[in-house]
DNA sequence: GGCGGCGGCGTACGGCGTACGCACGCGTTG
DNA sequence: CAACGCGTGCGTACGCCGTACGCCGCCGCC
């Protein structure tokens, strides 16, 4: 009765896999299955066809094994996704960046954006708090160095990172939605807005939303040109960094 | 063959329901089903038991009707969720706030945070771009007034709003994850971190992540006290507003 | 040379979204 | 007043999902 619903992953199980990934037994060294092969196949499917296409049967098929064989290595789908996420974090660059904290944070933001662009499924998979696997931990440590030694408290360092990464994720999600939309409709975002503009204006003026009509139209028309998800990312990032610089300057002055 | 996969909602269908919600026919004025009753029941379920518990059978049961009757009013589950989202937006306050743009934006941020706290399912439902229903449009218009007349271009106004709302959503998601975690484990976030601290430190020092260990521990120990999701929300919000004020000041100076 | 255990998997179950077609009764029309 | 058409409500059934359970064959060890 104390146990939890199956809707969610068991973090302890995911952690067990992530931290001491099965040392290969003498027997299993062969061409057989492994957590690693399963995770790689799963990431490949999710990258190519999206999270909805990721089913246990599909993963097994890609590996040429029976469906239930996958369960020998992974307790369930939710835990598989946990491991996929940590694995993806492991691919990120960890290069130290020369320059001030702003350059470093900017670099981190762009690296994270690239991650989400390469693995768009992560934007939908990370609805629950990610499990603290080794690669996430390494990422966290690496990113903390970007904001170390600039006068912030430990808690502030964490908060700054959370803020920047949150913005990146929001912007990445918006960009991903545009990609999805273009893929479904076959139109670019700009074309879509333009084709719906008259329809929109009808309702906006009818309901007397003049501001929304004007701004929405302006933003819409710029889509594909100056404006777009990339602009929102850049604009927001600079605003966030500007905001952070205020605290940094404060601390430097008080320090 | 040109049609799309069923994994996703048909925005046109959702829009049709949202904008000209069936004028009650003479016959259906009675105690029968309606889009409105269905949506209300669905929101009630999602609020109380989460998005996973929201099934078409469950909605029908709550209304005391057969499962398939729901489909008379709503084309499918995805479209139902679209309508739920727009309906939730409709509940938000639209009070004009006295004060400068910063006070207004802050108010908007808090209103949106409250929305996500009341309807935590929205954080998981909004993985695709929300359909532009009447209430979302009204919300957009209302929120635009907060950043009007402060010297920003139309595109910048949209970008500022996107930035603030993105931060709110990220912070709300983090807070919601903490709530979920507390509900599952029965421990507060602070207790959880403390109980896992020795375990964490083992791995962090073993893998030589001293920064992560120190900051993570500091942040973890403050959980439930000064630090926590609320702090991340407030800290981030002030940073974002600081960043916006830089552009606003620039524009004001440039006249 | 026997055997224990583990890797691999076939079958089956419950639950999901939903297509399809039928029954019923009301409002309209002749 | 009678006949009809259609909107409403719904029972059944299908194909998909995740996954519990138990069997089978082979490898490495005693």
Image: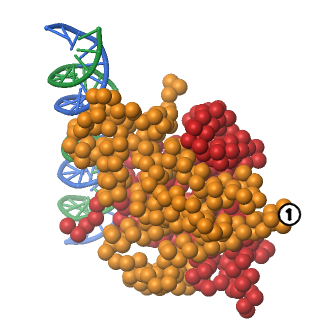
Chain colours: A orange, B red, C blue, D green
Relative vertical location of residue B77 with respect to residue A213 in this rendering, above or below: above
Q: Residue at x 56, y 85 (%)?
A: A214
Relative vertical location of residue D5 with respect to residue A224 in this rendering, above or below: above
Disc 1 crowd rating (10 Å Cα; few below 14, some 14-19, many 20+) is few
Task: Measuring from the top left, give residue D6's x and y in whole percent.
Answer: 27, 64
- Quarter of the image where the C terminus of chain B is located: bottom right
Name the residue tied to disc 1. Answer: A254
Give the number of callouts.
1
Residue A121 visible? yes
Of residues A126 and B161, which is closer to you in this image?
A126
- Quarter of the image where the N terminus of chain B is located: bottom left
Q: Residue at x 70, y 66 (%)?
A: A244
The extreme bottom residue here reads B255
Tell me: A120 left or right of A95.
left
Tell me: A89 left or right of D1.
right
Task: Measuring from the top left, give residue A238's x and y in whole percent.
Answer: 63, 73
The image quadrant of residue B148 is bottom right
């Amino acid at each position: 009765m104390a146990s939890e619903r199956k809707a969610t992953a068991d973090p302890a199980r995911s952690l067990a896999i992530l931290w001491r990934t099965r040392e290969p037994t003498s027997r299993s060294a062969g061409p057989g299955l492994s957590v690693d092969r399963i995770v790689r196949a799963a990431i490949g499917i999710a990258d190519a066809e999206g999270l909805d296409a990721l089913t246990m049967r599909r993963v097994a098929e890609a590996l040429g094994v029976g469906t239930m064989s996958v369960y020998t290595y992974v307790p369930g789908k939710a835990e598989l996704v946990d491991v996929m996420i940590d694995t993806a974090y492991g691919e990120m660059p960890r290069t130290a960046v020369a320059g001030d904290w702003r350059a470093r944070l900017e670099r981190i933001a762009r690296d994270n954006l690239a991650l989400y662009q390469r693995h768009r499924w992560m934007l939908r998979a990370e609805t629950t708090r990610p499990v603290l696997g080794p690669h996430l931990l390494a990422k966290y440590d690496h990113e903390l160095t970007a904001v170390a030694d600039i006068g912030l408290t430990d808690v502030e360092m964490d908060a700054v990172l959370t803020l920047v990464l949150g913005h990146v994720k929001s912007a990445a999600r918006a960009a991903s939605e545009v990609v999805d939309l273009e893929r479904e409709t076959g139109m670019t975002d700009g074309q879509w807005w333009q084709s719906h503009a008259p329809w929109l204006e009808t309702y906006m003026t009818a309901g007397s939303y003049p501001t929304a009509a004007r701004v929405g139209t302006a933003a819409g028309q710029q889509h594909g040109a100056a404006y777009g998800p990339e602009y929102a990312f850049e604009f927001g990032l600079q605003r966030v960094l500007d905001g952070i610089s205020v605290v940094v300057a404060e601390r430097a002055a008080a320090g």
